[in-house]
């Protein structure tokens, strides 16, 4: 199946710093990538939908200025958590929909666990 | 509102069969997904149903009834590695995925 690579897998940072997470589709082109956040013992929550070459669409309650999303190419989307605080500590997961698929199947990255001290 | 319901937790015995149910109410329907998630890992795709009926894939099968807003995931010949959370998700008319809270499946020897 298609592969989505997410980096870094683990990141620990100090409060107030910014962290960038990359999501790459390795063997397919993805016009749309999705960013999710999962807090412990809760379901995945969609944060934003990232479309190549255009601005991301954010879900209600997600601050666009805090969670910067850039989808510069058909194989790469990045999520930058700006001025991170301890409450931003979470599991961040990206997924991508292949350009040619008609099933709507999503392929998920491995996830990035962010801990803000 | 949009809603996905599935049991919080289920327990089954190694080698047995277990059925995890999912009911949904969404604005539109573009398919139902089942994902498996082991603790601390990203979900992995198991199945996709968009038409009524049963889809079989090895030890796992998924069933859909659109008229009833109902799906189930059937796991046969359970193995210890099947202990995980199973997430039901529905794609609505806007192609947004609406996620259930997941069913934690515990397999006992």
Image (tube, rainbow, N blue to C red):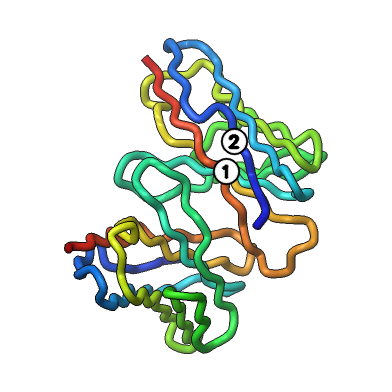
Name which quarter of the figure residue B97 lies in: bottom right
Residue wearing tag 1: A109
**Measuring 42% from the left and 43% from the top, which residue is drawn there?**
B41
Q: Quadrant of the C terminus of chain A?
A: top left
Tag 2 near tag 1, CB within 8 Å: yes
Rate crowding at label 2 as few (under 14), some (14 to 19) or many (20 or more) other CA atoms within 10 Å: many
**Measuring 52% from the left and 41% from the top, which residue is drawn there?**
A110
Q: Quadrant of the N terminus of chain A?
A: bottom right
- Relative to residue A95, is residue B33 depicted above or below? below
In the rendering, at what x and y percent does residue A62 appear?
52, 37
**Measuring 47% from the left and 11% from the top, which residue is drawn there?**
A16
- Relative to residue B45, is residue B24 depicted above or below? below
| Chain under disc 1 | A
Residue B8 seen in the current view: yes
Rate crowding at label 1 as few (under 14), some (14 to 19) or many (20 or more) other CA atoms within 10 Å: many
- Relative to residue A101, is residue B52 depicted above or below? below
**Measuring 27% from the left and 67% from the top, which residue is drawn there?**
B7
In the rendering, at what x and y percent does residue B94 appear?
64, 63
Label 1 sits on a secondary structure element that is: loop
Q: Nearer the viewer, residue B67 or A4?
A: A4
Q: Nearer the viewer, residue B46 or A106?
A: B46
| Chain under disc 2 | A
Q: Nearer the viewer, residue B3 or A71?
A: A71
Residue wearing tag 2: A6
Does label 1 lie on the same chain as label 2?
A: yes
In the rendering, at what x and y percent does residue A63 appear?
54, 32
In the rendering, at what x and y percent does residue A107 appear?
61, 53
Q: Nearer the viewer, residue B58 or B62?
A: B58
Name which quarter of the figure residue A12 lies in: top left
Which mark is first along the chain, 1 or 2?
2
């Amino acid at each position: 199946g298609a592969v989505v690579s997410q980096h870094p897998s683990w990141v620990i940072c100090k409060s107030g710093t910014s962290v960038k997470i990359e999501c790459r589709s390795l063997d397919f082109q993805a016009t749309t990538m999705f960013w999710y956040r999962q807090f412990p013992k809760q379901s995945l929550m969609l944060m934003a939908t990232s479309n190549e070459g255009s601005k991301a669409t954010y879900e209600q309650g997600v601050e666009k200025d805090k969670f910067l999303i850039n989808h510069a190419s058909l194989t790469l989307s990045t999520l930058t958590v700006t001025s991170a605080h301890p409450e931003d500590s979470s599991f961040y997961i990206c997924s991508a929909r292949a350009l040619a698929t008609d099933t709507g199947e999503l392929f998920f990255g491995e996830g990035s666990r962010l801990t803000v001290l | 509102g949009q809603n996905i319901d599935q049991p919080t937790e289920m327990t089954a015995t190694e080698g047995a069969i277990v059925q995890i149910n999912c009911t949904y109410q969404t604005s539109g329907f573009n398919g139902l997904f089942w994902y498996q998630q082991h603790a601390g890992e990203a979900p992995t795709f198991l199945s996709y149903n968009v038409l009524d009926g049963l889809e079989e894939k090895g030890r796992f099968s998924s069933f859909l009834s659109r008229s009833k807003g109902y799906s189930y995931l059937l796991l046969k010949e359970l193995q210890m590695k099947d202990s995980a959370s199973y997430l039901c998700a529905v794609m609505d008319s806007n192609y947004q995925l609406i996620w259930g809270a997941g069913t934690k499946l515990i397999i006992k020897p």
